[in-house]
Amino acid sequence: MPTLPFRYLHWDPERHGQATSTFERLMDLFQQLLQHTAGDAEEALHWLTQLDQRYNLTGENTGVGEFIEELKRRGYLREDAKGIAITARTERALRNRSLEEVFRQLRKSGRGRHRTPHAGTGDERLPETRPWTFGDDPHLLNITDTLSNSYRRSGLDEWSLHEEDYEVHETDHHSNQSTVLMIDLSHSMILYGEDRITPARKTAMALAELILRQYSRDTLDIVAFGDDAWEVSIKDLPYLSVGPYHTNTRAGLQRARDILRRRKNRNKQIFMITDGKPSCHFEGGRMYKNVFGLDRRIVNKVLDEAVMCRREGVTITTFMIARDPYLQGFVRQLTEANQGRAYYASLDNLGEFLFEDYVRNRRRRVR
């Protein structure tokens, strides 16, 4: 066998030249810092300056100041009397980056392919066929199988085409979905030196970008919960940060149910990202709180909400990013009350679990 004149290697920036420009490298680092500073541009730029002074990121003839000016020229930063802040373009870039990071992790882990045996009237044509029924879309007609059925029935001499000859392709059905993503912003999300809010925020941005791009008929609402619960717009996701809050899981579920009652899609679900037990709720307009252990006075009210969600056809999927045995016991009770699902996710694979569950849940059997 003759020797090939070319030898193909993996790209090595040190051997083959720099693959990205200085601006692109700094932009990538700036976005990473923004994810950790909850969208605080001034804090992110401060850290970038510190890194540049230590590692000479910008080279001999440039500096972070020139990078900031370029960000302004390209519409990523704005400056006013209150200081420097990111723009809507940067918010979109952060969502896009989060989505790419999650799918990169899915590809590395070999996950992310969500096949299903269920078929119905939907979007993606399958090779499998079935007899035609009234109302089937004509573009799904399998011409070859239809003609074969006709020839077998009537022969070539007296060929005819009857209704029972028609074959159509099966399809994957993608159902419209209404989702509420609940994010725990209680103080425990940053306790003990562990940053749990950054992966949760990144996952929320990635899910929002996925739905905006690929599932335009779906709806996504964000509910943050601490002492109380409140709605968060998609554009404000980069700025989510924890507060000196307790964990009012009941209020979060109540707000989520209120939102889903207004949605017209038949398929409704709640995704809840949390790391702790419910520790407070409102009684007669006043807050009752107990941070020690699992207080049945609080827990039972949360379980009541889970039951009401089940009766309204709303599935709760809990992503618990803590491993305490008594917290896992609470999640099991919640899951059983709602007949939902639970995942015990690490901070590294939270996005993988949530995305795999979301895409799989959009496939339904239709008869």
Image (tube, grey):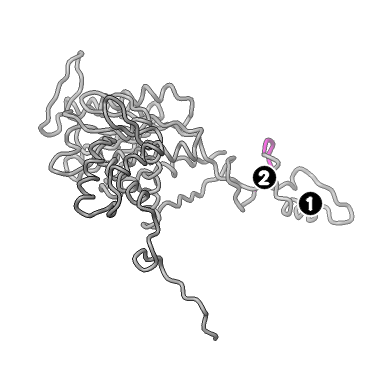
Identified at 25% across, 48% down, the residue is 346
Q: What element carries label 2?
A: helix
Give residue 172's position: percent from left, percent from top.
Answer: 55, 45
Identified at 30% across, 44% down, the residue is 30
Q: Name the residue under label 1.
A: 150
Q: How far apart are marks 2 and 1 (CA)?
A: 18 Å
* Quadrant in the rendering for residue 43: top left
Q: How many labels does the image show?
A: 2
Q: Nearer the viewer, residue 198 or 358?
A: 198
Q: In which quarter of the image is the N terminus?
A: bottom right
Give residue 142's position: percent from left, percent from top.
Answer: 70, 50
- Magenta run includes residue 135: yes
- Looking at the image, residue 228 lies above or below residue 39: above
Q: Give the range drawn in magenta.
A: 130-136
Q: Mark 1 is on which residue type? A: Ser
Report the side of 177 relative to 173 (left or right): left
Kindly identify which numbered label has been placed on residue 274: none
Q: What element carries label 1?
A: helix
Query: Residue most toward the right?
Result: 157
User: Which mark lies nearer to you, 2 or 1?
Assistant: 2
* Quadrant in the rendering for residue 152: bottom right
Q: Mark 2 is on which residue type? A: Leu
Give residue 97's position: percent from left, percent from top.
Answer: 38, 45
Give residue 351's position: percent from left, percent from top.
Answer: 34, 45
Kindly identify which numbered label has been placed on residue 140: 2
Q: Nearer the viewer, residue 147 or 285?
A: 285
Report the side of 58 relative to 107 (left or right): left
Query: Residue most toward the left?
Result: 292
